[in-house]
């Protein structure tokens, strides 16, 4: 009974749906025609022919590349059923009043405008394929901070955009980055000028509303010399019986002495395939931090990576995942050390409940000549039920013997004695399990702003419902 | 109504081995009982069974609290009725602060209580601070993860702290004095005496040492051998054990 109530809570808070009222939508399936149609809508053929060529090249790559077989099971994705582009509002607004009613209602229900008012420096909101809202605090705008969608980025700032777009994650990188590159729409384009410290976070919220739909946003962040940014992305989708697809690409360029933190609080419904490529290039003395929570979705495949290209650059990757019944969270991180005195830390924590499965997959690469590299990798997995599963695949490729590397992995089960201890203090079995799991994720929760930590704890409680066998 | 814990002819099996072999014991609110006995006599089993650890199987007998059998109740239900156990080996729970844990426990134990009687966050903090001070526990302790990295003595203090905040009707203290130094034992004893005075809590103290019984004076001392209570007497019985051991109580098989 309890489980049903809580899932209803989930549906009420995140899984609700609005009627589909697209102002433009492509036919289901992927073809050259669909890609050209997207380019047409975005006016790319007239002004920026190169992006249309980029898309077509990516489509070609996508069709040629084989489906990866090393990870999760992608065999059930039906690419022909998916709608690749759906525009629900004519343009991106800078005032909430101007956003179409049902879309605004969606974001109101999710508490997004309230968050913007209380603690954000800027907010972007995307609904299906396109950005519907983008705004940034005036003083930051005056300092030259750019926070907009990629279409606007390309039109208004072609020099910066063209210099970096597709260079960190080229379409050829993998099948899903190729897919994204062919049909990408929406996302964020961010530029922080030299020395600017964006003290409050910038946030983007990605909402899928449509059914059998694919969301392919693209995020490009350029942190210029000595700048500092904390970017947060969140997402959610209604619960449908048919599968949806989310294949995003995130590119970060952290120029010398910059500091970029990228926090993700993912909360997809269980019918979403989430196949994301996230990569950063860190130059001299730069720090890149991925703080990544993977909740929900049917399958998530995501390994945020940092290419440490400049001396003394640092990577910190914290990845947490929760896999419930029927879900597979294939997550982890990659640190590619290409310069001396670089350091990296990868921390992964995962919980599997019921038939849920988590996989840690990580790569630690130290190139020849990258001397005095320091790296620590730690992954902890917690299994709730007997049928829960976890696997660990840490890959190391070390070509410089001055590297100092530590690797630790643990797998735990919540034992009878621990539950007894907590229950002897008046907690029910479910409450005791929740408490242990929350404690397990505490190293993550304390890294994110309080408002998000509260949200994260709520989500974990929703995920934990019905875990007493 | 005065609370009463009655254990009647209790037989308990674990891994096909009988540990408790017909144990009888009654503890009333306000009373202090000590249970002494050689290793392996079943003392910790008794404590765990009263609290409802799922790994033990009760083959016959009953445990009655306030007139009703509690055998079918899960540990949390027993805790809510007013039973408490201070663990011999408290578990470490990473990421959960002592303050958060205790506040949660306090709320759950006191559900059903009038809203106005449940302490607010600030009142609770005050209560916790006061109890921590009297146990000589550093205030930073509240922020530390539950039992993680604590010394043996600190863990025992943390258990007693929980008892003094949750204020049970009957508290079972499983070797709460073991592994504590003289000073720690003194503060622990004071807190237990204070709990008795403030809440009229009945104490069932499992111990190997007469030392703590000089501070927390038992009304009755029970000698447990091979799964049964073989002798009950006043505090002088503990002195006898101290000087001549358990041999005289040995059961002839």
Image (cartoon, coloured by chain):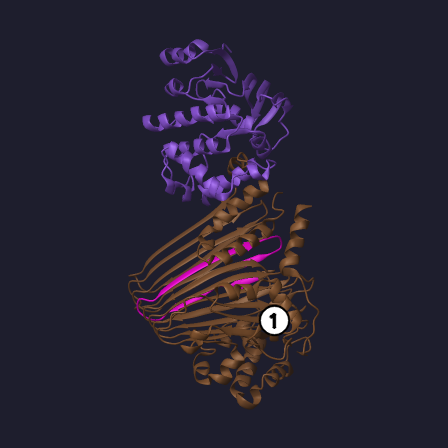
For the residue labelled by badge 1, is the local secondary structure a helix, a strand or a loop?
A: strand
Residue A207 in picture, x, y percent from top left: 60, 67
Magenta residues, start to end:
A300-329
User: Residue A314 lies in magenta, yes or no?
Assistant: yes
Tell me the chief SS of the magenta region. Answer: strand
The answer to whether one can see residue A138 in this image is: yes
A291 relative to B83, above or below: below
A166 relative to A395, above or below: below
A385 relative to B223, above or below: below
Specify the quadrant of the image occupied by residue A13: bottom right
Q: Colour of chain A?
A: brown
Query: Residue drawn 48% across and 40% down?
Result: B123
The residue positioned farthest toward the front in the image shown: B116
Tag 1 subunit: A
Q: Specify the quadrant that holds the C terminus of chain A.
A: top right
Letter of the chain shown purple in the rendering:
B
Query: Residue drawn 63% across and 75% down?
Result: A84
């Amino acid at each position: 009974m309890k489980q049903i109530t809580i899932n209803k809570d989930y549906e009420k808070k995140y899984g609700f749906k609005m009627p589909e009222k697209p102002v433009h939508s492509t036919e289901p399936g992927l073809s050259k025609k669909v890609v050209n149609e997207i380019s047409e809508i975005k006016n790319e053929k007239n002004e920026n022919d190169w992006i249309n060529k980029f898309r077509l090249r990516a489509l070609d790559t996508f069709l040629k590349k084989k489906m990866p077989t090393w990870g999760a099971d992608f065999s059930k994705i039906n690419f022909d059923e998916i709608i690749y582009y759906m525009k629900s509002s004519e343009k991106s607004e800078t005032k909430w009043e101007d956003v179409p009613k049902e879309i605004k209602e969606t974001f109101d229900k999710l508490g997004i405008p309230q968050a913007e008012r209380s603690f954000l420096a800027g907010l972007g909101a995307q609904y299906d394929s396109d950005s519907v809202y983008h705004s940034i605090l005036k003083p930051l705008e005056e300092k030259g901070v750019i926070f907009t969608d990629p279409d606007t980025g390309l039109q208004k700032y072609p020099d910066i955009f063209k210099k970096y777009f597709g260079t960190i994650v080229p379409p050829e990188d993998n099948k899903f980055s190729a897919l994204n590159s062919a049909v990408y729409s929406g996302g964020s384009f961010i530029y922080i000028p030299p020395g600017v410290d964006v003290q409050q976070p910038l946030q983007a919220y990605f909402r899928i509303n449509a059914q059998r739909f694919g969301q392919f946003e693209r995020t490009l962040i350029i942190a210029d010399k000595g700048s500092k940014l904390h970017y947060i992305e969140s997402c959610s989708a209604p619960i449908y019986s048919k599968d949806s697809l989310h294949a995003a690409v995130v590119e970060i360029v952290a120029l010398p002495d910059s500091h970029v933190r990228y926090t993700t609080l993912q909360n997809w419904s269980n019918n979403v395939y989430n196949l994301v490529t996230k990569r950063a290039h860190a130059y001299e003395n730069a720090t890149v931090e991925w703080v990544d929570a993977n909740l929900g979705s049917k399958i998530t495949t995501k390994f945020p990576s940092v290419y440490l290209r400049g001396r003394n650059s640092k990577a910190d990757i914290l990845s947490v995942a929760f896999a419930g019944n029927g879900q597979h969270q294939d997550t982890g991180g990659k640190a590619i050390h290409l310069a001396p005195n670089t350091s990296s830390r990868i921390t992964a924590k995962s919980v599997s409940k019921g038939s849920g499965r988590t996989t840690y997959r990580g790569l630690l690469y130290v190139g020849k000549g990258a001397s005095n590299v320091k790296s620590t990798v730690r992954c902890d997995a917690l299994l709730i039920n007997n049928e829960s599963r976890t696997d660990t695949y840490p890959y190391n490729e070390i070509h410089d013997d001055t590297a100092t590397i530590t690797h630790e992995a643990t797998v735990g089960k919540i034992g009878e004695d621990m539950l007894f201890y907590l229950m002897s203090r008046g907690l029910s079995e479910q409450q005791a399990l929740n408490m242990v799991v929350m404690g397990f994720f505490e190293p993550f929760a304390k890294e994110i702003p309080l408002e998000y930590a509260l949200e994260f704890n709520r989500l974990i409680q929703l995920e934990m419902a019905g875990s007493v066998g | 109504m005065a609370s009463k814990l009655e254990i009647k002819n209790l037989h308990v099996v674990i891994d096909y081995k009988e540990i408790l072999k017909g144990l009888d014991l009654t503890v009333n609110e306000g009373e202090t009982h000590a249970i002494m006995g050689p290793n392996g006599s079943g003392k910790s089993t008794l404590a765990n069974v009263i609290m409802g650890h799922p790994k033990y199987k009760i083959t016959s007998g009953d445990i009655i609290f306030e007139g009703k059998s509690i055998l079918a109740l899960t540990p949390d239900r027993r805790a809510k009725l007013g039973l408490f156990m201070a663990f011999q080996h408290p578990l470490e729970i990473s990421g959960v602060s002592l303050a958060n844990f205790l506040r949660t426990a306090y709320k759950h134990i006191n559900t059903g209580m009038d809203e106005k009687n449940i302490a607010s966050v600030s009142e609770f903090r005050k209560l916790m601070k006061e109890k921590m001070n009297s146990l000589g526990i550093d205030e930073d302790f509240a922020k530390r993860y539950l039992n993680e990295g604590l010394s043996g003595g600190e863990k025992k203090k943390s258990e007693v702290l929980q008892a003094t905040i949750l204020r049970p009707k009957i508290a079972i203290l499983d070797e709460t004095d073991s592994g504590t130094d003289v000073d720690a034992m003194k503060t622990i004893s004071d807190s237990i005496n204070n709990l008795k005075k403030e809440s009229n809590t009945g104490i069932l103290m499992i111990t190997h040492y007469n030392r703590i019984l000089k501070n927390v004076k038992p009304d009755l001392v029970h000698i447990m051998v091979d799964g049964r209570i073989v002798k009950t007497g006043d505090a002088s019985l503990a002195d006898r054990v101290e000087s001549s051991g358990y041999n005289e109580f040995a059961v002839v098989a």
